[in-house]
Image (cartoon, rainbow, N blue to C red):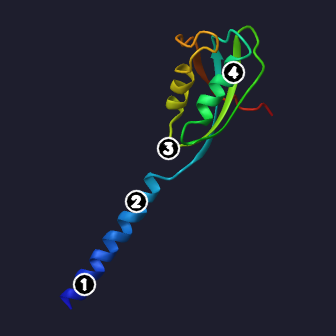
Amino acid sequence: MKNIFSILATLCLVFLGTIAFSQSNADVYLTAQFKVSGITCSGDMPVIKKKLINQEGIDEAAFTEAKNGVVTFTVKYHSSVISEKQVREIIESAPSCDRPDEYPYKAKSIVPQPKKQ
């Protein structure tokens, strides 16, 4: 009887541990937007986009047309692999297209505003 109880107790602990682990590491597919400044030419956006989509955990990256040296990037990523902060750091670590030894970009997260009803 003790052996059966021990086996059941062990199975319960393994099962509960699996549930707790899977919930804490749940993958959430997120979309973040960033205002990126420091854009000097039309080649900057593709450089940043390429750096983003070559990163594990990022599925998509799109950008708007530059206005006054600022572009909006929309990035879709998996939260279990990469964080929003890391996405921003990747943007800021991309080299300038015409000066590859410089890293002129600054990224700021855009928090979506609730729609008025």
Say the numbered circle drawn on residue 20. 2
Nearest to viewer (mark 4 / mark 1): 4
Q: Nearer the viewer, residue 71 or 28?
A: 71
Q: In the image, residue 81 lies at what x, y percent?
A: 50, 44
Q: Which residue lies furthest to the left in this view?
A: 2
Please identify the quadrant where the N terminus is shown: bottom left
Q: Mark 4 points at which residue?
A: 45
Q: Which amino acid type is marked by label 3?
A: Val
Q: Which amino acid type is marked by label 1?
A: Phe
* Rendered view: 87 above or below 28: above
Q: Do the residues labelled 2 and 3 touch (CB within 8 Å)?
A: no
Give the mark nearest the N terminus, 2 or 4. 2
Task: Say few, some or many: other residues with alpha carbon within 10 Å of mark 1 (under 14 / 14 to 19 / 20 or more).
Answer: few
Q: What element carries label 1?
A: helix
Give the mark nearest the N terminus, 4 or 1. 1
Give the mark nearest the N terminus, 3 or 1. 1
Q: Which amino acid type is marked by label 2?
A: Ala
Q: Name the residue under label 1.
A: 5
Q: Which amino acid type is marked by label 4?
A: Met
Q: Mark 3 points at which residue?
A: 81
Residue placed at 54% from the left, 41% from the top?
A: 56
Q: Distance between the residues labelled 2 and 4?
A: 41 Å
Q: Do the residues labelled 4 and 1 touch (CB within 8 Å)?
A: no
Task: Say few, some or many: other residues with alpha carbon within 10 Å of mark 4 (under 14 / 14 to 19 / 20 or more).
Answer: many
Q: How far apart are marks 3 and 1 (CA)?
A: 39 Å
Q: Distance between the residues labelled 3 and 4?
A: 24 Å
Report the side of 2 relative to 76 (left or right). left
